[in-house]
């Protein structure tokens, strides 16, 4: 077993139990964890894209974290106000001090507020979802764990099956190792997770079609999220968003699939069970 794979396994063995515990406990503890994840992910993204102002970097992170806190307290209307304030602040600072690439940097600041900040912040909405439909709070941890588990199994199946049998590349100029064979294996891996969950009635208000929707969200959109982040890294000419997690790359690398899957899953839950 090579050193890279050993390091990947080591980080997973340490981090996965901690993550499971935090999802289980929920409340302010899980919120704090997601805030840390978003703060680090934003810093990595803004550093990769050479965002010019350290003051605005800190401001974008701070305002984004306020947005995630508003998720926790179910104050969704504050998001519009925060986005307007961020847009205004960006405009003033960039016009006065950073006129070069003004439009790029202006919309990069707003884009970072949406992705990865609010998109990863949807994990908080999912954990707190039981509050909207009056089911036991602990149901939120089952929703969260099923989402994480579907993404993890999908990634593992896609990685190992793709390494062994991958012949037909999806987008080699962006992600040379991703193959259609691995992608299909990842979708089937997610399907097995949710078929088992359906068999044991893990979420008592879910039916078969809800689990099938989760399969599509994690198996298809989760892998698409990974591909989008790969395109971002290729555009700026780096392999990983950082080396903070050793062979796992950066925090954004670890949450890229969830950054797309989580908001779609929350939207599905909201439209299916609230509206």
Image (spheres, rainbow, N blue to C red):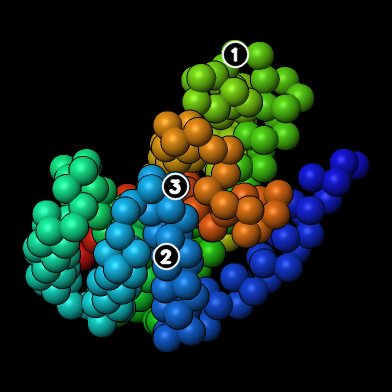
Q: Nearer the viewer, residue 119 or 85?
A: 85
Image quadrant occupied by the C terminus: bottom left
Q: Residue at x 38, y 54 (%)?
A: 46
- Position of residue 242 in the picture relative to residue 267 (left or right): right
The answer to whether residue 240 is above or below residue 237 is below
Estimate the spatial distance between the alpha carbons at disc 3 and disc 1, rounded to whole Å: 30 Å
Q: As drawn, which residue projects farthest toward the front?
A: 97
Q: Nearer the viewer, residue 193 or 169?
A: 169
Which residue position is annotated with label 1?
168
Which residue position is annotated with label 2?
38
Which residue position is annotated with label 3?
48
- Closer to the chain start, of discs 2 and 1, is 2
Image quadrant occupied by the N terminus: top right
Estimate the spatial distance between the alpha carbons at disc 2 and disc 1, rounded to whole Å: 34 Å
Disc sitting over residue 119 in the figure: none
Q: As drawn, which residue projects farthest toward the top?
A: 168
Would you say residue 60 is visible in this rendering?
Answer: no
């Amino acid at each position: 077993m090579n050193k890279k794979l050993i390091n990947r396994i080591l980080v997973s063995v340490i981090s996965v139990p901690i993550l499971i515990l935090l999802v289980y406990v929920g409340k302010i503890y899980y919120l704090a964890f997601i805030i840390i994840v978003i703060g680090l992910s934003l810093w990595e993204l803004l550093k990769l894209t050479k965002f010019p102002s350290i003051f605005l970097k800190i401001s974008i992170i701070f305002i984004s974290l306020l947005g995630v806190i508003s998720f926790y307290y179910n104050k969704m209307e504050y998001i519009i106000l925060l986005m307007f304030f961020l847009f205004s602040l960006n405009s003033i600072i960039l016009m006065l001090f950073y006129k070069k690439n003004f439009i790029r940097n202006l919309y990069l600041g707003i884009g970072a507020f949406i992705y990865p900040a609010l998109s990863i912040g949807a994990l908080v909405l999912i954990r707190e979802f039981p509050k909207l439909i009056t089911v036991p709070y602990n149901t939120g941890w089952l929703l969260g764990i099923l989402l994480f588990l579907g993404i993890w199994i999908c990634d593992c199946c896609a990685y190992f099956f793709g390494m062994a049998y991958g012949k037909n590349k999806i987008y080699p100029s962006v992600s040379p190792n991703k193959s259609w064979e691995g992608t299909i294996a990842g979708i089937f891996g997610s399907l097995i997770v949710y078929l088992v969950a359906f068999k044991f009635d893990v979420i008592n208000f879910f039916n078969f079609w809800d689990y099938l929707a989760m399969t599509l969200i994690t198996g298809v959109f989760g892998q698409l999220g990974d591909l989008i982040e790969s395109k971002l890294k290729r555009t700026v000419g780096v392999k990983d968003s950082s080396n903070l997690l050793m062979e796992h790359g950066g925090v954004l690398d670890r949450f890229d699939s969830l950054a797309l899957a989580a908001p779609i899953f929350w939207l599905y839950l909201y439209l299916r069970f609230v509206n």
